[in-house]
Amino acid sequence: ADPIIRLAEFGNRQLRRANLLSMGAGLGEAAMVFLPALAVAAFGVTESRASFLLLPVVLAVAIGSPLGGRLLDSHGPRPVILGGTLLLTLGMLLLGLLGTDFNAFVIAGICIGFGLASLLGAPIRYIVLTETNEGERAAGQGLLTIATGVGQLISGALIGAVAASQGGGVVGYTVSYLFVAGAGVVLIFLALGLKGKARQGV
C-alpha cells in the first residue's frame, strides 16, 4: 500500500537522473576501497601506511560538504553537481594515467573527495525534495540510498574484475580507474541535463 520504491518516480526525468547520479556516486565511493592497494603496488609502502593515503579524500569530503551546501544555496544544484562530476572524473583519470606518481596520486584523492562531497551530500537530495510531493519525499530519499548501494556493489565487481583481468598490481588498478573515469563521463552528461533552477516552495 505504501511501497518504498514508487515506480511513478521513474516517469520524472529529473528523478531518473538524480538516481543515476547517486548510483555513480556509489560507484566512485566504493572505488576508494582499492586506493590503498594501488598505493602498495605503486609506491611499495606497507598496507598500514597506504591507508593513510586516503586522508586527502577524507579531508576533501569534510571540507567540500559544507562548501557544497553553501554553493547549493546560492547557485542551485546543477552547477554544484556538474562541478562534482567533473572533479570526480578528473581524479579517476589521474589515477588511471598517473597513478604511479605520488603527487598526482594525492591530487587525485583531493579531486575525488571534493567530487564525492557534492554527489553524496545535499545537492542530489535537494533535487528529490523539489521534484516530489510532500508525501513522496521520504520514499524518494530512500530510493537514492538504494541507488547508491547498487553503485557500490557494481564498483566492487567492476574494479575487481578489471584488475584481475589485467593481472592485478599497478596495471590492473590503473586500468580499473580508467573504467571508473569512463563512468564519470556519463555522469557529466547526466548532470548537464539537470534543471538550472529548482522548483520553488520547498
Image (tube, rainbow, N blue to C red):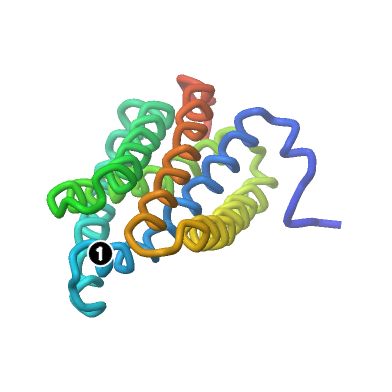
Residue 198 image offset from top left, x and y in percent? 50, 26
Of 79 and 179, nearer the camera is: 179
Q: Image quadrant of residue 145?
A: bottom right
Label 1: state its secondary structure: helix
Of 6 and 105, nearer the camera is: 105
Of 54 and 120, nearer the camera is: 54
Task: Give the side of residue 139 with respect to residue 3, left or right.
Answer: left
Q: Is residue 183 above or below residue 161?
A: above
Q: Is residue 137 visible?
A: yes
Outermost residue toward the top in this view: 196
> Can you identify the residue that label 1 sits on?
39
Please state which amino acid type lies under the numbered disc 1: Ala
- At 48% from the left and 23% from the top, the residue drawn is 192
- At 48% from the left and 29% from the top, the residue drawn is 191
Task: Give the side of residue 146 with respect to residue 76, left or right.
Answer: right
Q: Image quadrant of residue 30?
A: bottom left
Task: Give the side of residue 87 with respect to residue 85, left or right.
Answer: left
Q: Is residue 191 above or below residue 178?
A: above
Q: Is residue 65 visible?
A: no
Q: Is residue 78 above or below residue 109?
A: above
In which quadrant is the N terminus drawn?
bottom right
